[in-house]
Amino acid sequence: MSDTDVDVAGRSQGETDRRLPVTLSVNGQARQLEVDPRTSLLDALREHLRLGGTKKGCDHGQCGACTVLVNGRRVNSCLSLAVMHEDDEIVTIEGLGDPESLHPMQRAFVERDGFQCGYCTPGQICSAVGMLTEVAAGWPSHATADVASPSVVLTDAEIRERMSGNICRCAAYPNIVAAIRDTAEGGAE
């Protein structure tokens, strides 16, 4: 093999063109794709499936703008490869609700003005939905007063701790906390 047959990452020619078939269940619908095995779940959703609700913020798992639900758990989609999710149920902001029938968390964010520029909002909402599932299951956080208790008291400190992986550069945090509290008290799905 000559030097011209290897790219800067050390891959041989042809290796960069390798694509794998993957079927992703996104928002209740099976979607078939062929992707480079290095394609993140975020890029598969945005670039291949054209679901623009999931945002690319930092692309390093630090801001939470790309948060989606995978099998009911919140995941930073920029840190996960699409090919890892063949048998998983993926829910994006588009799958939570629609303008005619908002998810309770979406409705609370609107009612409490839990957004300003809105860029982080889809990730905030998906994370909040996943977080309430964790609370319902009794999973403690670093802010939980009694980690041995089978239930978690959802204080403002508990909400802030659990949502700490989702950054809002506009600082709409008080309204986000209020929206999550409203949803929790109203029996969110």
Image (cartoon, rainbow, N blue to C red):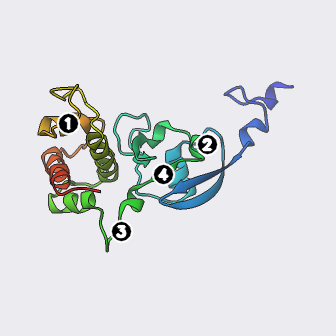
Question: Residue extending furthest front?
Answer: 150
Residue at the disc numbered 2: 83
Question: How far apart in space, not on screen, are marks 2 and 1 (Cα)?
Answer: 35 Å
Residue at the disc numbered 4: 90
Question: How far apart in space, not on screen, are marks 4 and 1 (Cα)?
Answer: 26 Å
Q: Earlier in the sequence, mark 4 or mark 3?
A: 4
> Badge 4 local density, few (<14 within 10 Å), some, or many (20+)?
many
Please, what is the three-letter code of the amino acid marked with disc 3?
A: Asp
Q: What secondary structure is found at the residue carrying circle 3? A: loop
Q: Earlier in the sequence, mark 2 or mark 3?
A: 2
Residue at the disc numbered 1: 152
In this picture, residue 44 sits left or right of residue 138:
right
Decide which of 65, 29 is in the foreground and name it.
29
Question: How far apart in space, not on screen, are marks 2 and 3 (Cα)?
Answer: 27 Å
Percent position of residue 154, x then y: 16, 40
Q: Earlier in the sequence, mark 3 or mark 1?
A: 3
Looking at the picture, does residue 176 appear above or below residue 59?
A: below
- Disc 2 + disc 3, Cβ < 8 Å: no
Q: What secondary structure is found at the residue carrying circle 2? A: helix
Looking at the picture, does residue 170 appear above or below residue 162?
A: below
Numbered disc in front, either 2 or 4: 4
Please, what is the three-letter code of the amino acid marked with disc 2?
A: Val
Task: Please name the residue shown 67% across and 27% down the image.
Answer: 9
Q: What secondary structure is found at the residue carrying circle 4? A: strand
Question: How far apart in space, not on screen, are marks 4 and 3 (Cα)?
Answer: 16 Å
Residue at the disc numbered 3: 98
Instruction: Name the mark on residue 15.
Output: none
Quadrant location of the C terminus in the rendered image: bottom left
> Badge 3 local density, few (<14 within 10 Å), some, or many (20+)?
few
All told, the count of numbered labels is: 4
Please, what is the three-letter code of the amino acid marked with disc 1?
A: Val
Question: Residue extending furthest bottom?
Answer: 100
